[in-house]
Amino acid sequence: MTKKGQRNKTSTSRPPREIESTLIICSEKPKTVVRQIGSLTSIANYRLLFRDTETIHDLYFDTRDRSLQTRRLALRIREIGAMRWITLKGPSLPTDWGGVERLEIEEPWSQDALTRVVRELMSRKIKMPQQRQDFDYAHPLDVMMNLRLEIVQDRNTHRQVRNIVSASEESKSVLAELAIDSVVYHFSGQAICHHEVEIEVKVEDSFTVLKTVIESLVAMYNPALRRWHHGKLATGKAIENLLSEGALEGLLDIERNLKPVAYDKIDDYLMRGGI
């Protein structure tokens, strides 16, 4: 992210890719682990440079027949303060070092950005109606509804961001980015809390950085940190479905945080193709 919430996706001859790895905080005291990781100033041979904390609101959309979900696509509108972005993410492809790589188009909310996303969806055989009203910057929800898209997930994220830079160089060139996310999912009047750490590559040849940071964090905080191969969207959908089935009964603490055993159920549900 170059500015608050905005990722630095430059145009190239190939579609932009997101390369990242995720660890969930799987603890009876997740907020304590969040504070501990948030206090780190270095990991392995890298410094962690503090950035401003972000408060993010994400709305995810799909067609009525869930065409995006079928194709493992994720479409969202993100708001951070007065700023908005539109994002389209493709299927996650596992990498050799335990992370994921996927298509990501993310641009500031505008008519041009919306047109680019709609064209990408249509290129993937998703039927989209013509925009029937003028573009409205101030009311993205209305714009998406006019495209016959429905909200499929509503969540808020408190994000602590750290730039990962070399400890041996004076340069502050950002190699990767670490985000400590405390997520609140909103399901029909219920709020469910989930905590995770994301590390995203910012320089094309920085895969070793990501791998080293992930392995160091797991070694430092095991078993409170666990590798997680599911995105927030899929994780949230699994939580919502398991809640409706009563399968998470007793697996939330008094502050509505997921208990460690809940993640076993969520992972099993997703691995069985529940979404």
Image (spheres, grey):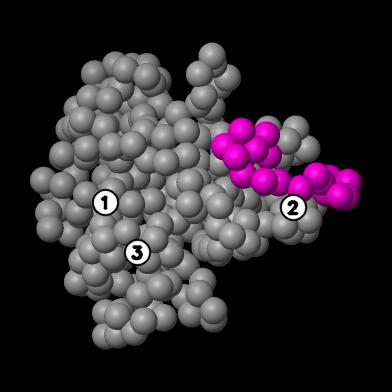
Residue under the point 26% across and 85% down: 250
Q: Is residue 201 rendered to the left or right of residue 15?
A: left
Task: From the top left corner, tell me how far across and down residue 155 is, in percent.
Answer: 52, 63
Assess disc 1: are there few (<14), some (14-19) or many (≥20) residues with their C-alpha within 10 Å of its C-alpha.
some
First along the sequence among labels 1 and 3: 1
Residue under the point 47% across and 75% down: 191
Could you tell me how many numbered marks the image carries? 3
Q: Is residue 3 visible?
A: no
Assess disc 2: are there few (<14), some (14-19) or many (≥20) residues with their C-alpha within 10 Å of its C-alpha.
some
* Location of mark 2 (residue): 147
First along the sequence among labels 2 and 1: 2
Q: Which residues are magenta?
A: 118-136
* Location of mark 3 (residue): 274
Residue under the point 45% across and 47% down: 72
Q: Are marks 3 and 2 in contact (CB under 8 Å)?
A: no
Task: From the top left corner, tell me how far across and down residue 51 is, in percent.
Answer: 45, 40
Q: Secondary structure at mark 3?
A: loop
Q: Kindly report the distance in space between the C-alpha atoms of the residues bearing marks 2 and 1.
A: 33 Å
Q: Kindly report the distance in space between the C-alpha atoms of the residues bearing marks 3 and 2.
A: 27 Å
User: What amino acid is at disc 1?
Assistant: Trp
Task: From the top left corner, tell me how far across and down residue 241 is, in percent.
Answer: 40, 73
Main secondary-structure element of the magenta-colored stretch: loop
* Location of mark 1 (residue): 228
Reply above or below: 249 against 45: below
Q: Kindly report the distance in space between the C-alpha atoms of the residues bearing marks 1 and 3.
A: 16 Å
User: What amino acid is at disc 3?
Assistant: Gly
